[in-house]
Every structure is written in structure tokens, then in C-alpha cells.
Amino acid sequence: MTEESVFGGDRRKLEWRAFLFLTVVLFPLLAVAVVSVFVFLIWIWQMFSGPPGA
């Protein structure tokens, strides 16, 4: 029995949906979250240590 006969076309459709979800939704949101946390940490650091060159 082949994998295609066991799962039919549903597995391929599910994989495409998962791929699109990862590339269109999850990865961009994670990128924005990581950059936002980094900028927030720099902002907090500058509140205590002053602006650069001060």
C-alpha cells in the first residue's frame, strides 16, 4: 500500500495549508515579535543608562 492510497489527497492539501500558514502568518508574526522585543529592550536599557554618547 502506498502512502498516497492510505491518505489520499487530503495529506497533500493539509501540507499545503500548513506551509501557507507558516510562511504567510506565523513567520512574519514571529519576525515582528522578535524585532519588537529587541527594540523594547534597547528602549528600557536607554531609560537607565541614558542615550548613546551621554
Image (tube, grey):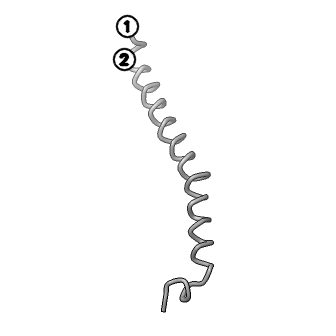
Residue 5 picture quarter? bottom right
Quarter of the image that includes the C terminus: top left
When asked about the image quadrant of residue 4, the answer is: bottom right
The disc label shown at residue 1, or none:
none
Discs 1/2, front: 1
Q: Amino acid at mark 1?
A: Gly
Tag 1 residue: 53
Frontmost residue, 28 versus 48? 28
Q: Residue at x 37, y 17 (%)?
A: 49
**Residue tagged 2:** 49
Q: Position of residue 9 (x, y in %)?
A: 62, 79
User: What residue is drawn where x is 40% and y is 12%?
Assistant: 52
| Rendered residue at 60%/84% (across/down) | 8
Q: Is residue 1 above or below residue 46?
A: below
Q: State the image coordinates of residue 35 (x, y, percent, origin top left).
A: 49, 35
Residue 37 x %, y %: 47, 37
Identified by mark 2, the residue type is Ser
Q: CA distance from mark 1 to mark 2?
A: 10 Å
**Horizontal side of residue 52 vs 24, given as left or right:** left
Within 10 Å of the Cα at label 2, are there few (<14), some (14-19), or many (20+) other Cα atoms?
A: few
